[in-house]
Amino acid sequence: MAARGLIGNVAVAGGNLVRSMRRRGLECISLPIEGSYPEWPPRRPRLPFPLSFMVPFTRQVSLSDMRAATRMIGADNRVRCVVVQFGPLDAGLATLYSVRRLLLALRSKGKRLVAWMPSAGIAECYLASVCDDVLLPESGRVSALGLRAEAIFLKDALALVGVEADLEAIAEYKVAPDTFRRSTMSEPHRFMLNAALDSYFEHIVSVIAEGRGLSTERVREIIDAMPMDAPRAVEAGLADGVAYEDELQAYVSGGDGNGETRGGTPSAPVATWDQASRWLRRPVRRKTRQAIGVVSLEGLMVLGHSRRSPVPLPIPFVQAQAGSATVVQALRQAEADRRIAAVIFHIETPGGSALASDLICREVRRLRARKPVVALMGGQATSGGYYAAAWANRIIARPTTMTGSIGIWGGKFVLRGLYTKLGVGTEAVERGAMAGLYSGSESFDAAQRARVRRDLGTAYARFIGVVAQGRRMAEEDVEDVARGRIWTGAQAVEIGLVDELGDFETALDHAKELAGLDADETPTIVRVHAGRRELAPLPYLDDRSAWWPALNSLRALAREGVWALSPWMVRMGS
């Protein structure tokens, strides 16, 4: 392994000598900003022949790719200016926070940043505010309209087809089942959304104000005056000039618009990223003896094995499922690998199965006894996602991460009315007083409802206890910030559910510190996946609890009846 690393670095060093021979043409390069920027490139299953040739794949640029690109640009002193060209953005606020930090790091390296936006929403304005200059074409339009949270309620729609949601929740802020059992928003639901929007909006406004040299009051006034055309955006202070793409070369060179600088010499061309990336020096990576492992939990949490759609789908629950068996095995692989000194546990999930959450949390707790674990929250690490993170040594979140939602809900959908509409008759015979507890033919009777509430109460008490022990808080204090309430990352730091605001680099610093590694050294990063050979858990001191058998699929999630899942139907947008 060491020999291969040495040979690889020799090859990189040789290539850098060739790349260094190019003296001109890299003074100004273009860096595209578009897409959704997942934390890591998703691993998709291979499609069988001939589907592997029939289904086109466009590789998504990830935050890890962006980190590598900005490191190359920042380290190359031939690059003096970077034109940040915006395309269609589909990234959440937490991801945008990380992208902005990477652009800010470029600027700290002495690179001039020029943003060019054909059009701009609040996401583009948020990112562009870090740049020295912001340009729009004359026909450009700024539509930074603000933030909006919209909840969907399906009770009346379900009633039309004869379906009733018989669901219970603990506690008042656990509003995920309200999607199915209510027609309007409850007051706790409205209060929670308003608090989250206030936190998000305050962060965005303050960032734009700082970047553009405006007061927060002025930024709020500008947003309220939206939309506006390019000249008005310049007048308001959101942009610095008006230029079409073909005029960028003259602008960044301080030219007169005719391809020449004010001194009469030709302006430097703007190299595209494809052109420039071939000539930028590659970093020489030194393989460190110890590594930092990265384990990812992405998607709806279910029992069994993880699944990901082979093709991108717009349905969040179908796109990716984080199976407890797969995540547990990945954590055990990280534990068994002697090179790995600490683990970054990346979490991007709305939660899901309460049982799956507990199994994963147990594994994190067991791993922590042997190696440090730093939880890194993505855009959402709510309910079961927070449950899984609770026993990490440190928890890192973005300011706009959605987390918390410490609560439980469950129940069933009653199909009796649908059966009647379809002319379907049902009869049943039973053995056991609770045999029909989760039957879809009838609503809960009083005894059944009491049993469901008891089970939910037990799961909620366990959830509170896990958080209290993992975060070293009193259960009464956890209860005060629990009750199903969702918190932003910025809010979660203040109440003790999160240790620090940051992103991957922050989590890496904490992992090095906890593992006793040199703070100035960049350790080898290893993405850890479940291996082909399953590993049994090593014994954990004081542990006598039984492991429940792992099932799989969404059907098992439905059968479970007890869920640690946040209101995934709520979407934040501009």
Image: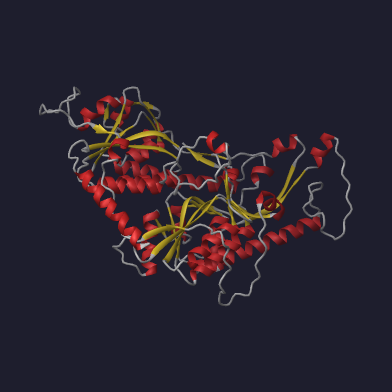
Residue 239 locus on image (x, y percent):
29, 32
Judge whether residue 19 can be spotted in this image.
yes
> Is residue 430 toward the left or the right of residue 404 in the image?
right
Name the residue located 48 percent from the left edge and 72 percent from the top edge: 370
The mark tally for this picture is 0
Residue 161 locus on image (x, y percent):
75, 35
Residue 572 locus on image (x, y percent):
50, 41
Screen quadrant of the N terminus: bottom left
Name the residue located 51 percent from the left edge and 57 percent from the top edge: 529
* In this view, 442 is above or below 343: above
User: Splitting the image into 4 quarters, where does residue 407 fall?
Assistant: bottom right
Q: Between 267 and 411, which is closer to the camera in this rendering? A: 267
Q: Residue furthest left?
A: 263
Q: Between 179 and 23, which is closer to the camera in this rendering? A: 23
Residue 570 locus on image (x, y percent):
56, 42
Q: Between 8 and 431, which is closer to the camera in this rendering? A: 8
Please, which colouring scheme is shown?
Answer: secondary structure
Q: Between 445 and 322, which is closer to the camera in this rendering? A: 322
Name the residue located 67 percent from the left edge and 52 percent from the top edge: 557
* In this view, 152 is above or below 492: above
Q: Residue furthest bottom?
A: 542
Judge whether residue 169 can be spotted in this image.
no
Name the residue located 30 percent from the left edge and 26 percent from the top edge: 245
* In this view, 189 is above or below 522: above
* In this view, 269 is above or below 44: above
> Is residue 188 toward the left or the right of residue 29 in the image?
right
